[in-house]
Amino acid sequence: MSVPIIKSPRAMRQWTFEQRCAGRTVGLVPTMGGLHEGHASLMRESVSCNDVSVLSIFVNPAQFAPHEDFDRYPRTFEADLALAEGIGIDAVYAPTSSSMYGQDFASYLTVERVQDGLCGGSRPHFFRGVATVVTKLFNAVLPHRAYFGQKDAQQCAVIKRMVRDLDFDIEVVELPIVRDADGLALSSRNQYLSSAERLEALNLSKALARGLELMQRGERDIRRIEEAVRAELADLDIDYVAVVDADSIEPLAVAQGNVLLAAAAHVGATRLIDNVKYTFPESAADGFPRADSRKREYAISAK
Ligand code: AMP
């Protein structure tokens, strides 16, 4: 039997009510389609941890500025369906634009401070669009759990804060970045890259691996970490390189605690993002004297 495709919030809620009435847990994997192994990892986790799982596919106009790539964003619906079905997704929520943003739509959500730095600095419209659409997806799908990728680490931080602040009864699960064998983080936008650009794009993960290595060796001077990453980014057109607190996405005086090292750069006409996370061991110098709790969370292994 083929997977049902649900196109309106009302029909989606009806489907979920039936699942919940039958005592089933519901997982949600929100995407914009153009699916790849990164999305597949989220779907697999949802399928293995919930009784039923919903994949949403919606290219959200509210998170694109007029000059951005909304029109050319990869739309591969049939292939996406086949992948989802193979993984065991139980329903695909693919709302129409008009059912999501009716005439006179006027209500947008902002998550102050968390959305301001990094991508929020260069794409001021972006997180307002993301927080709004994720709220709408949550209200339609009513999931118990929702799955997001660390690839969009600031997006995860925004959604976690929003869920906490607004009392959504949803567990947000953040999963590691899936990469190609050479380290390039998978992204729907990688399809835009020529083979020469793809080679250049590899500098992004290499540069972040260098930053990670410095932090693992104990470097806590943020300026030095950022400069080392910038130096490795060579000829790329850098949008930002930043070390921030991984939960609040706010600047740090010195690298400590849970740290996010994130970068964005243009490769030709394509804007790519990538990041690594690192948890510094707590020490007396941090003001938190405790036994060694060294916990390393990184998706790129620094060589
Ligand atoms: P998108 O379709 O790009 O909006 O992404 C949908 C979800 O997939 C988001 O939670 C992303 O963070 C996640 N995602 C995208 N690329 C990757 C990747 N390479 N590894 C893990 N998750 C990813």
Image: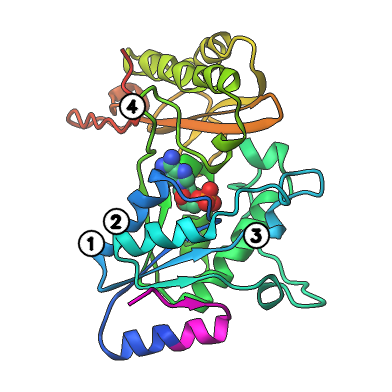
Magenta extent: 1-14
Label 2 sits on a secondary structure element that is helix
**Distance between the Cα atoms at labels 4 and 1?**
31 Å
Which residue is at a point 75% across and 77% down the rendered structure image? 102
Earlier-in-chain disc, 3 versus 4: 3
Q: Name the residue under label 4.
A: 280
Near-viewer residue (185 or 154): 185
Mark 1–mark 3 Cα distance, whole angstroms, equals: 27 Å
Real-space Cα distance between discs 1 and 2?
6 Å
Q: In this view, does 26 lie to the left or right of 203?
A: left
- The residue under label 3 is which amino acid type? Asn
Q: Nearer the viewer, mark 4 or mark 1?
A: 1
Q: Are marks 1 and 3 in contact (CB under 8 Å)?
A: no
> Which residue was labeled with disc 3?
60
Whether 122 is among the magenta residues is: no
Q: How far apart are marks 3 and 2 (CA)?
A: 23 Å
In this rendering, the answer to whether 231 lies above or below 211 is above
Label 3 secondary element: loop
Vertical side of 121 occupied by 243: above or below: above
Residue at the disc numbered 1: 48
Q: Nearer the viewer, mark 4 or mark 2?
A: 2
Of marks 1 and 3, which one's residue comes earlier in the chain? 1
Residue at x-position 34% and y-position 14%:
218
User: In the rendered view of the protein, which quadrant contains the N terminus?
Assistant: bottom left
List x then y, in percent, for residue 96: 64, 73
Q: Which of the 4 quarters of the picture holds residue 97?
A: bottom right
